[in-house]
Image (tube, coloured by chain):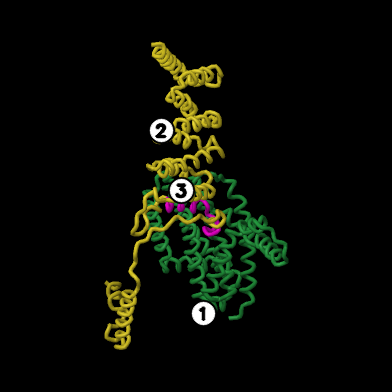
Amino acid sequence: MFFQILTISKYTVIESLRNRLFLLTFLVIVISFAMVEFIGDLAITEHRVTQAAILAAFLRMSAVVIVTLFVVSSTVRELHDKTLEMILAMPIRRGNYYLGKLIGYFYIALVVSILFGSLLLLYADSQQVFIWSVSLFMELVLVIALSLVMLFTFNQVPSALTGVFIIYGASRIVTSIFLMAKYPIIAHTSIAQQFMDGFIELLTWLLPDLHRYTQTEWLTYNTADWATLLPLLGQTIIYLLFLSFIALFDFYRKNF
Amino acid sequence: MHSYYYFIHKDRPVSDVPGAIKFFLVLTLLLQLLWHSLQDPIVAKAEDLAAPLSTRTYVMSSLGEPIAVSKLLNLWLQAFDNQPGASISFHQLDYPRLTEWLDTSLALDPRGHYPMLVAARVYGSIQDHEKQRIMMDYIFYKFNEDPNKYWRWLAHVVITAKHELKDLNLALKYANALAEKATGDNVPYWAKDMKIIVLEDMGQIEAAKILVGALIDSNEITDPYELNFLTSKIKVLEKKLLKKRQSVEK
């Protein structure tokens, strides 16, 4: 069983190499470096802080986009090329296939996090960069699981990508929306408003706390310590399991 | 060799493309060029500085990256005088609006000092005293919010008021605030001593001498260099006072 999982994950990694995913990652690094050096020339003070802040935000978003595009396009290709059907025709459990894909994608997320983190070493404290990179990896783990859920649900690239980006974006800003709804400038008591407030509060319960992950502040003002990662790890494990069971629920019900 | 052959010969020859496709390709390209030539010419037009949006809007539109968006706003604001094809001077900028932008940037990144630096050294260094005063007022307002954090920018403003505006009363007001409110350990003695210098420049040597004496007597100053400075300052002030009295008697 374990051998099957490893084989599937191995071929997922091979596919990423053939798709020139790491070449794309290097390209992003080169572009980011050029951009951030230019920004450094523009800034008249706080050069390093300005560079680190903009670079970190750009790399974080780029990592999420690259990994999401890869996971969705690679899995949808397997669905459409009937590779998945061929694999499932063999004595392999659907759960093992899912786990194999997940581990393969985690490896890719790890490499992307390390590569992006190494560029940040030029602009920020090494311990803070390490914590930031670990947090980015955990964030990407959730993005991968979310991409698989969306793909098993929608089966199509545009809808799956839209779903991932909406949920990811909402997870990052839901706290701000919640605070705005809770403390409005003009208080409303209409039923529609109460419904919306309740809905937003429900979202804060259901979505992961992504605003706590991969914070730029850590790199600019050295505010993170190792303990920062513990609640993130807890949230990652819980939400990864939650998303995985949603994906498996859909996957086991699928007819090919 | 193989890959070279592949890249050169992987597609069919151009002659295989139907003539109609080639014709319409050229035609649509010409159509695009014609369309562009019919458009109004692009003219550089300097834009006024618009009011900033709320900080929440910036936080949400950057997906929760307030520090990064603050740094980008700083750079954008700094480059606002250089708009595409048009260059406007800082004199033309709406200064009260400018302070709103600086405030927004500080709200997004409260630990940053970038907005204060541009307020003091960029926007506060123009040859327009009225606008300089707006910036100085803004720095004084921010100083009052957190004196131990923003003391250095008020110290800069004291120098600007003294040397550029030649408004010693204003310089004294700011130096007074520095001496009274910036009491943290991080604030150096020279910043607190600015009041003595301004009083001396104003010719209020007696007041300056009393202040120096009070500082020495307070026993709050433990730094030997600072004590030396104050002791020698008293001597300098006494000499000046003597000269002043002698010139009055004559």
Q: Does residue B181 show up?
A: yes
Magenta extent: B59-77
For label 3, the residue is B95
What amino acid is at disc 1? Lys
Is B69 included in the stretch rendered in magenta? yes
Residue A120 magenta-highlighted: no
Q: Dot 3: few (<14), some (14–19), or many (≥20) neighbours within 10 Å?
A: some
For image coordinates 35% across by 54% down, the residue present is: B87
For the residue marked with disc 3, what is the amino acid? Tyr
Q: In this view, does A242 lie to the left or right of B188?
A: right
Q: Nearer the viewer, mark 3 or mark 1?
A: 3
Task: Choose mark 2 or mark 3, whichever is in front.
Answer: 2
Chain letter for mark 2: B
Q: Which chain letter matches label 1?
A: A
CA gap, disc 1 to disc 2?
A: 82 Å
- Give the number of the disc on residue A82: 1
